[in-house]
Image: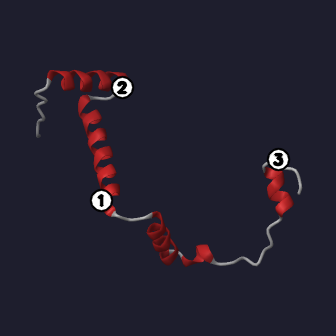
């Protein structure tokens, strides 16, 4: 079992306070924060744009782009949003 010692009293008090308010252990809180930070760093360093992500999604699942042959009913979709007919 590894231990983590927080030398800064203000930081240790903050972790204790947040853990208590969140209803989790200090270990669980630190883990949650570390996972969130890692995910944020992964997103920043991945360099993947939204467009690149969509391109990959469409390559991996080509059926998403298939046309159904159905005609969209504008009046129906407008009624879902309570919009008046044009």
Residue visible at 84% across and 52% down in the picture: 79
Pointer 3 with pointer 2, Cβ within 8 A: no
Measure how far apart labels 3 and 2 are at the Cα level.
43 Å
Please report whichever mark, 2 or 1, sits nearer to the chain's N-terminal start: 2
Crowd around label 3: few <14 · some 14–19 · many ≥20 (10 Å)? few
Q: Position of residue 7 (x, y in %)?
A: 10, 27
Of circles 2 and 1, the one toward us is: 1
Residue 82 image label:
3
Quarter of the figure that contains the N terminus? top left
Measure how far apart labels 3 and 1 are at the Cα level.
42 Å
Pointer 3 with pointer 1, Cβ within 8 A: no
Q: Secondary structure at mark 1?
A: helix
Q: Position of residue 78 (x, y in %)?
A: 82, 55
Mark 2 sits on what residue?
23
Q: Position of residue 14 (x, y in %)?
A: 26, 24
Of circles 3 and 2, the one toward us is: 3
Please report whichever mark, 3 or 1, sits nearer to the chain's N-terminal start: 1
Please report whichever mark, 3 or 2, sits nearer to the chain's N-terminal start: 2
Which residue occupies the foreground of this view, 21 or 8?
8
Mark 1 sits on what residue?
45
Q: Is residue 6 left or right of residue 39?
A: left
Measure how far apart labels 2 and 1 are at the Cα level.
32 Å
Residue 76, compared with residue 12, is above or below; it is below
Q: Secondary structure at mark 2?
A: loop
Q: Residue furthest front?
A: 86
Q: Residue furthest right?
A: 85
Q: Position of residue 4 (x, y in %)?
A: 13, 35
Residue visible at 20% across and 26% down in the picture: 11
Which residue occupies the foreground of this view, 1 or 6?
6
Residue visible at 26% across and 43% down in the picture: 34
What sort of colour scheme is used for the picture? secondary structure
Crowd around label 2: few <14 · some 14–19 · many ≥20 (10 Å)? few
């Amino acid at each position: 079992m590894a231990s983590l010692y927080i030398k800064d009293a203000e930081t240790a008090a903050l972790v204790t306070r947040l853990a208590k308010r969140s209803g989790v252990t200090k270990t669980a809180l630190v883990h949650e924060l570390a996972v969130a930070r890692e995910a944020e760093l992964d997103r920043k360093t991945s360099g993947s744009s939204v467009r690149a992500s969509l391109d990959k999604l469409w390559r991996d699942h080509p059926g998403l782009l298939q046309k159904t042959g159905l005609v969209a009913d504008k009046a129906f979709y407008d009624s879902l949003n309570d919009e008046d007919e044009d």
